[in-house]
Image (cartoon, rainbow, N blue to C red):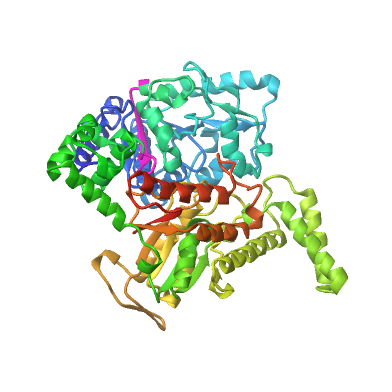
Amino acid sequence: MTSGNRHDAADARKARDTAPAAARGPLHVPGALTVLERIPTVVLNDHRDIAVQVARRIADVIRARNAEGRDAVLGLATGSTPIGVYRELIRMHREEGLSFRQVVSFNLDEYYPMAPDNIHSYHRFMWENLFAHVDADRAKVRIPDGTVARAKIEAWCAGYEKAIRDAGGIDVQILGIGKTGHIGFNEPGSGEQSRTRLVHLDTVTRRDAAADFFGEEFVPREAVTMGVATIFAAREIIIIATGEHKARVVRRAVEGPIDIEVAATFLQRHPATTFYVDAAAAGELTRVATPWLLDEIEWTGLRTLDAVTWLSRTVGKAILKLTQQDYADHKLSSLVARHGSPGAVNGLVFNELGAKIRGKSKLPRGKKVVCFSPHPDDDVISMGGILRKLTENRNEIIVAYMTSGNIAVFDHDVRRHVDFLLRMNKDAGVGGAEVKALAKKVRAFLAAKKPGDVDIPEVADIKRLIREAEAISGLETVGLPASSGRFLNLPFYQTGKVKKDPIGPADVQIVKKLLAETNPDLIFVAGDLSDPHGTHRMCKEAIDAAVEGLWPGRSRGPQLHRTGEHRIAPSPEVWLYRGAWQEWPVTEATWLVPMSQEELRYKIQAIFKHQSQKDSMPFPGQDDREFWQRVEQRNKDTAAILDQLGLAEYFAMEAYVVD
């Protein structure tokens, strides 16, 4: 948003929150830049800002309805999207006295069939993530029942609709959005007049859920969901999306035509819907991606880079060949006018992009470097090329693996390693009776294990050790010694489930201790926003808190601190890399690090060392390719973009942003 739009938003929010409840409309930021947006959309920096704003709105509704002497009626969603909102509501309950005694809630959906105590149940999710931590009245909590007999499900759904009407209707409904544009489980083809019902789940939806169920084959094929018309009847709707992987469907829902194949587009007809998105999810909105097509804008350096590279790729010409006519035909005449001629702006952008390229000779030498790897393979997946170059430049490198990654190891790998131990025991006498006892216990557990069951400590430890051994082998492939690897095993990850605990003081302290001991000049951090389970984002939260604790107010310049016996050097430089899902755009990247064919081959070999993640990954998302295939294509594509823009041609390239 521009500064003016932020003031407009603040004024709109103030007017809305002080108006009578019935008169409150959705927050809308006016202006030409939002002219294509058919759902008022608020873009905030990240998911935490969204959580705070949405939780405040819900709290306002609760207090307003309670002041009127009646219950507030909330429509609630599950999944990773609203967890931040629920955590903020819990904080408000504990610290600000927000009460839920006069709240009636109706949840959107539930898998079918599904027992309420199942680890995958949305009933269990809601109690673990909200209701058990506030003063909710159990009698007022309504969640679709996944245990109703099939012959009675239609009548049960009708009863759910009646209960909503009897409660006076939903005051505010919270939604997420799926990659197909579904809201609730209203999959492509769901009608605008649909009500609560049993539905068949779309293949894309089941694949998205595969990680939670430890395999697509275990995901239920049906679910009970509120219908589009049920959702539409809410007096106010808040829909939330975060992460780059939601950017395309956000634009489709907000700017595209209403389509039965994209249920979220029906919300364009709702009089009081607001879309809350973070910067990543907003990335493909026209006002963000190509705002010059909508209105006069301020030509900042980044926007100039974006516009010229966009123009170059749109017309299929190298940057230095762009003409006055090319700029005029694509509403960029003002950019040429600002610089005086096409040649001037072409040369500026060409030189800026060229200056981003850093081969080995321009990379740090003799520095202390810490690479934080959320999982035990993110280091080589994302920065295997630069790790090899930094090693050759004689930097002192520590790779800190923040979580064990054991949740992503298949049970058959455990069986294989246990079999190896038994053979070592039999043929070489290694381990004695302890090995036989361990093997017996592990085999018995795995034989009785159901999908989603939390592993016993022995199995979890074997999975952890498998990934640690693979990580060390990967380091050695890029030229680092085994001693470079540190395994932090942060507590937040140790739930045994896909869903993790929030980052806590213990996590921050472990990271802080490592930084104090190593005094790095440079740290690498996973900065991507599309990790399906949020582990990368949560690890970054721990690092940010640790860095702020050691170097408070980093932006104020270099400072020296002491922690125990460790003298903390001036604040390190932070380079952000991205994981297996996306790469930094060349315009956003601070540095572009080229790789030769041989260097890319070494990187791929290092990824191969993570054998438990090869061939059949536990959490592939919507991409069937193995990690090495995604990485190879991504790194080659980054280099190809520079070639298309008319810069030097390289075989492959990694991208980094200096934070």
Q: Is residue 130 left or right of residue 239?
A: right
Q: Is residue 623 left or right of residue 10?
A: right
Q: Which quadrant: the C terminus?
A: bottom left
| Residue 374 visible, this angle | no
The residue under the point 49% across, 71% down is 398
Residue 370 at x, y percent in the picture: 45, 69
Q: Is residue 442 left or right of residue 48?
A: right
The residue under the point 51% across, 22% down is 227
Residue 418 at x, y percent in the picture: 78, 61
Q: Is residue 583 left or right of residue 33?
A: right
Foreground of the two, 499 or 630: 630
Q: Quadrant of residue 330?
A: top left
The residue under the point 17% across, 35% down is 333
- Residue placed farthest to the right in the image? 426
| Residue 599 visible, this angle | yes
Q: Which quadrant: the N terminus?
A: top left
Foreground of the two, 1 or 199: 1
Query: Considering only vertical position in the picture, is 255 above or below 63?
Result: above
Number of marks present in the image shown: 0
Residue 18 at x, y percent in the picture: 24, 34
The residue under the point 17% across, 47% down is 344
Query: Considering only vertical position in the picture, is 455 above or below 18?
Result: below
Foreground of the two, 238 or 357: 357
Q: Quadrant of residue 455?
A: bottom right
Q: Is residue 280 magenta?
A: yes
- Residue placed farthest to the top in the image? 193
Region rendered in magenta: 269-283
Foreground of the two, 244 or 340: 340
Residue 504 at x, y percent in the picture: 47, 60
